[in-house]
Amino acid sequence: MIVAPKAAAYSPKGECNWVCFHDDLGNIHTYEPTNCDDYCEDCIGTIVEKLFADESAERPDGFVEFCFDTESSKENEGFCLCDNCGEHIFVSIIWTEQELEHWLSLDADGWAKSLADNSCCYELMQILDDCYGSSEWFPDETSKIADAVLLYSSRRTEKELRLLYARREQLQKECAELELRRDELKESLSEVLQETE
Ligand SMILES: [Zn+2]
């Protein structure tokens, strides 16, 4: 798959964390003001510390202290991004049409940027790899995305073409030089062979 090398170069975060608080009865509750926010393992500590230091942050009834809860193989509608650093958090994806529509609305520039970006290729790989289920739930959309990946990844920019032509010229020159050298060597060898026979 075309997007595989870039996708493999991207490592998603492993955990989905959210902010909670302990109450005075020893129970843990989700902290409502950040109820919808997901944070990766590298960010949750900072977020909790920030809230702790922020005296204007809401303290619900019975509040004792901030903490967090973790889910390591979360099921999520669409991709899950850390609300602090924006990196992907690995989730088991429940596919939605909206998730795929984004890709169907991209223009050539959008595709060029996405195909050059490891994290976008990571998304595309999950969409296009049968084992993640996108093609089962949305076969039409998925196959349109696959076609677009093929179409746009084969398009080369003018700069890429110029570089390719320069490389071709350089290689042709090197080949010609080596051929010349080979002929010289062959000639020397045959001379030596004649002398020693
Ligand atoms: Zn993060």
Image (cartoon, grey):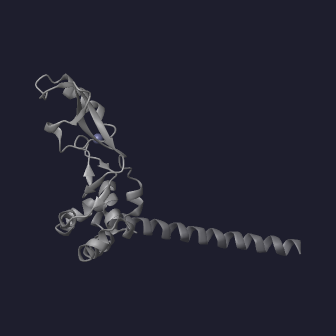
The x, y position of residue 123, in whole percent, is 30, 59
Residue at position x 26%, y 27% in the image: 26
Residue 51 shows up from this direction: yes
Vertical position of residue 176 compared to residue 44: above or below: below
Vertical position of residue 38 compared to residue 189: above or below: above
Which image quarter holds the N terminus? bottom left
Residue at position x 18%, y 45% in the image: 36
The x, y position of residue 40, in whole percent, is 31, 42
Quadrant in the rendering for residue 20: top left
Which image quarter holds the C terminus? bottom right
Q: Which of 174 and 51 is in front in this view?
A: 51
The x, y position of residue 8, in whole percent, is 42, 57
The x, y position of residue 31, in whole percent, is 18, 36
Ligand 1 quarter of the rendering: top left
Q: Nearer the viewer, residue 38 or 114?
A: 38
Quadrant in the rendering for residue 23: top left
Residue at position x 24%, y 44% in the image: 38
Residue at position x 32%, y 69% in the image: 153
How many circles with numbers are drawn on the protein?
A: 0
Q: Residue furthest front?
A: 25
Vertical position of residue 187 compared to residue 37: above or below: below
